[in-house]
């Protein structure tokens, strides 16, 4: 018998597999199943059993695949919502019936948005939006389109600053761009920054603000252009400490600005060299009031954010909610140390945990006798008392001999600063 003489007729039924061999001469029947056909037969058996089980699942809704107990099947729990149609698609991926949540979202509102709109500060800022005051003249109904971009000045955590000119007068401005589409805290920061600078910018040691413009997504705070900040002076221009005679002159202006904020029941809360700007005449001015807080009975009651950790007072590290403007006095003291030394006292504390632990537990930073005059060392010690009750108040510092001397002392900061900036 040859391969040509033999043919196989494989017949598949629902549950039975039959292999027949027929020969051309019909002399006999020799039936056998090859290994390949055996595997095919086994596969058909698996498919057949699967179909049978599927039929059982469809026919019985109370069939339980897994038994939690050898003796008792769990009773099917009744849904809280009796209107649920159980197992609508014969799907048994989960034995637990799903429940729909009938929540009414129609009357929900945004309390955060309501808080902002209803705030007095927001309303005060909104009244002044669109008006620029330049050279004693007011320009109303202004928009960001009235500004002509010149260059970038810097980038911060909550916005960027560009140099621009007002098209009508060609007045140069430093324009701070702040996003209106951020989180609730970011929106509060924008409002606080606008409110503080609009209500305090007339002071000689707070950066002057021409006005505030707005569009659909951003707020633009238009300020005077400054030459540099103390942080850049230390780390980029001098690359070291500032001469003491200039530091002491700066202290007078910074202290005056901080005390003026306190008279307005405000607290800066982010006192540091990068927020101390210098104009070309060498006059120092405070800026960046986004994390400023409100004082009631000299205690902080409203605030956003924390400020830079390097300058936090020990009581703020300890999460004391009742701190007051003396926390800014500590930050002021750390800034003085940095101006003289050219670095912060916690320069080697690279991790936040280590930094905060050192602020809380280490002795207060001190200057050596070889690094500063006795008057400045004493002044700094009054600022950096860890016990808040022993730390000096603004009025105490204003009455200090060092401040009285340098308030009336002529120091030509302008010429010194211009020489530095031109060379830089």
Image: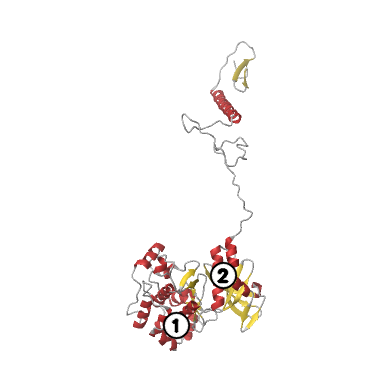
In percent of width and height, residue 226 lies at 53, 79
Residue at image position (45%, 81%) is 250
Q: Residues within 10 Å of mark 1 (few under 14, many from 20)?
A: many
Seen in the picture, residue 303 relative to 211 is either above or below; the reply is above
Disc marking residue 191: 2
Disc marking residue 401: none
Q: Left or right: where does residue 289 sit relative to residue 357?
A: right
Residue 236 visible? The answer is no
Residue at which label 1 appears = 252
Seen in the picture, residue 305 relative to 337 is either above or below; the reply is above
Secondary structure beneath label 1: helix
Residue 349 is drawn in which quadrant? bottom left
Secondary structure beneath label 2: helix
Q: Are marks 2 and 1 in contact (CB under 8 Å)?
A: no
Decide which of tag 2 and tag 1 comes sooner along the chain: 2
Q: Left or right: where does residue 190 sit relative to residue 259?
A: right
Q: Left or right: where does residue 175 sit relative to residue 420?
A: right
Quick one: 99 or 21, which is closer to the camera?
99
In percent of width and height, residue 374 lies at 34, 82
Residue 324 is drawn in which quadrant? bottom left
Quadrant for the N terminus in the image: top right
Looking at this rendering, what residue extends furthest in the top direction? 27
Q: Residues within 10 Å of mark 2 (few under 14, many from 20)?
A: many
Seen in the picture, residue 356 relative to 232 is either above or below; the reply is above
């Amino acid at each position: 018998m040859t391969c040509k003489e033999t043919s196989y007729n494989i017949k598949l039924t629902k549950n039975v597999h039959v292999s027949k061999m027929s020969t051309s001469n019909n002399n006999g029947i020799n039936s056998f199943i090859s290994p390949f056909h055996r595997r095919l037969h086994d596969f058909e058996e698996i498919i057949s059993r699967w179909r049978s089980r599927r039929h059982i699942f469809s026919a019985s809704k109370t069939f339980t695949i897994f038994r939690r107990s050898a003796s008792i099947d769990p009773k099917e729990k009744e849904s809280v919502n009796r209107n649920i149609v159980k197992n609508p698609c014969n799907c048994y991926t989960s034995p637990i019936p799903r429940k729909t949540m009938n929540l009414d979202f129609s009357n929900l509102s945004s309390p955060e948005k309501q808080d902002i709109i209803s705030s007095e500060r927001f309303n005060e800022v909104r009244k002044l939006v669109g008006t620029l005051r330049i050279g004693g003249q007011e320009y109303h109904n202004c928009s960001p389109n009235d500004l002509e971009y010149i260059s970038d000045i810097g980038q911060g955590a909550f916005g960027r600053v560009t140099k621009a000119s007002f098209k009508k007068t060609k007045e140069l401005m430093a324009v701070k761009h702040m996003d209106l589409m951020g989180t609730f805290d970011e929106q509060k920061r924008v409002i606080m920054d606008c409110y503080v600078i609009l209500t305090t910018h007339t002071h000689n040691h707070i950066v002057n603000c021409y006005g505030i413009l707005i569009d659909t997504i951003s707020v633009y705070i238009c300020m005077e252009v400054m030459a540099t900040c103390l942080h850049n002076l230390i780390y980029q221009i001098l690359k070291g400490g500032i001469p003491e005679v200039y530091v002491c002159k700066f202290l007078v202006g910074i202290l005056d600005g901080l005390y003026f904020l306190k008279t307005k029941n405000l607290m800066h809360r982010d006192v540091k060299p990068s927020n101390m700007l210098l104009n070309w005449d060498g006059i120092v001015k405070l800026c960046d009031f986004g994390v400023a807080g409100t004082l009631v009975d000299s205690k902080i009651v409203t605030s956003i954010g924390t400020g830079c950790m390097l300058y936090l007072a020990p009581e703020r590290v300890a999460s004391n909610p009742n701190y007051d403007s003396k926390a800014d006095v500590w930050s002021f003291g750390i800034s003085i140390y940095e101006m003289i030394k050219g670095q912060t006292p916690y320069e080697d504390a690279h991790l936040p945990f280590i930094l905060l632990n050192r602020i809380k537990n280490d002795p207060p930073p001190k200057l050596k006798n070889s690094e500063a005059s006795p008057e400045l060392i004493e002044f700094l010690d009054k600022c950096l008392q860890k016990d808040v009750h022993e730390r000096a108040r603004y009025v105490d510092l204003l009455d200090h001999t060092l401040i009285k001397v340098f308030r009336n002392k002529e120091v030509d900061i302008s010429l010194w600063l211009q020489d530095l900036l031109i060379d830089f």
